[in-house]
Image: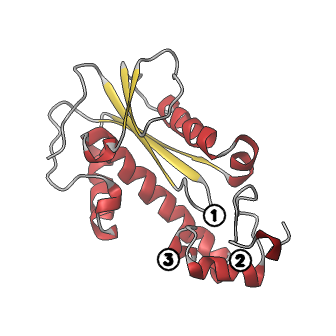
């Protein structure tokens, strides 16, 4: 079972989704959970089925002290790089919380200080702490929902299924149809980059 908190302060967990995708935004969420929050299912979003993620999303939203989600679009990812875009998305999510956290726990090993609030980077934090796991669920479900909407406009890439990740099917579609406005131009879209004029 995941740990409730890293320390005794008013604590926000934050995580991102979509960092390794070829298309679509990188999405981050920040979540402050109540001290008595418990859930036996909640864990790293990557370890859960889509059904369980969709079941957990409204529970987290209802029971959280505060939560927020932020998208950073491909044009900005291409400008500032994916690491900076991921951190910026987390900062935006934290900035949109209705309560200012006293401490921030971050999934992964890279972060930039936010508003002088102390923070701790935790590798695989989404499988260790409830608030980071909750943030991973919201980031993943909100991003998947956005990719499903973009799929309606660009069905040839099948984003409703691959969510913009570099699957063989996705890369074959890029080879056939070229890049959409939602593709990240700074990413290596095809193994043989010479085959695609970007």
In the displayed structure, 138 sits above or below 169; it is above
For residue 9, above or below residue 107 = above
Q: CA distance from mark 1 to mark 3?
A: 14 Å
- The reply to whether dot 2 and dot 1 touch (C-beta < 8 Å) is yes
x then y, percent, for residue 164: 58, 67
Q: Alpha-carbon neighbours of circle 3 within 10 Å: few (<14), some, or many (≥20)?
A: some
Q: Residue drawn at (53%, 68%), measured in percent from left and top? A: 163
Distance CA(mark 2)–CA(mark 3) = 15 Å
Q: Is residue 32 left or right of residue 186?
A: left
Q: Which numbered mark, 2 or 3, is in the foreground of this view?
A: 2
User: Where is residue 130, by image quadrant?
Assistant: top left
Give the residue number, with chain letter if any, for mark 2.
174
Query: In screen coordinates, is 188 left or right of 63?
Result: right
Toward the viewer: 85 or 166? 166
Mark 1 vs 3, N-terminal side: 1
Q: Which residue is mark 3?
A: 161
Label 1: how many residues lie within 10 Å, few (<14), some (14-19) or many (20+)? many
Return the residue nearer the eye: 86 or 99. Answer: 86
In the picture, the disc for residue 22 is 1
Specify whether 40 is left or right of 94: left
Of tags 1 and 3, which is closer to the observer? 1
């Amino acid at each position: 079972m995941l740990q409730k908190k890293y320390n005794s302060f008013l604590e926000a967990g934050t995580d991102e989704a979509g960092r390794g995708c070829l298309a679509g935004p990188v999405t981050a969420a920040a979540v402050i959970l109540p001290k008595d929050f418990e859930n036996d299912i909640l864990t790293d979003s990557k370890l859960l089925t889509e059904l369980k993620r969709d079941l957990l999303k409204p529970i987290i939203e209802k029971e959280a002290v505060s939560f927020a989600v932020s998208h950073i679009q491909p044009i900005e990812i291409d400008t500032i790089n994916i690491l900076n875009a991921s951190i910026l998305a987390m900062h935006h999510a934290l900035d949109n919380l209705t309560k200012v956290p006293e401490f921030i726990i971050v999934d992964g090993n890279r972060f930039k200080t936010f508003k002088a609030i102390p923070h701790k980077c935790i590798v695989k934090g989404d499988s260790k702490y409830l608030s980071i796991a909750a943030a991973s669920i919201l980031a993943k479900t909100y991003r998947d929902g956005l990719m499903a909407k973009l799929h309606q406009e660009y069905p040839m890439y099948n984003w409703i299924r691959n969510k913009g990740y570099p699957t063989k099917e996705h890369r074959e579609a890029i080879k056939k149809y070229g890049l959409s406005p939602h593709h990240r131009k700074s990413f290596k879209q095809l193994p043989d980059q010479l085959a695609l004029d970007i």
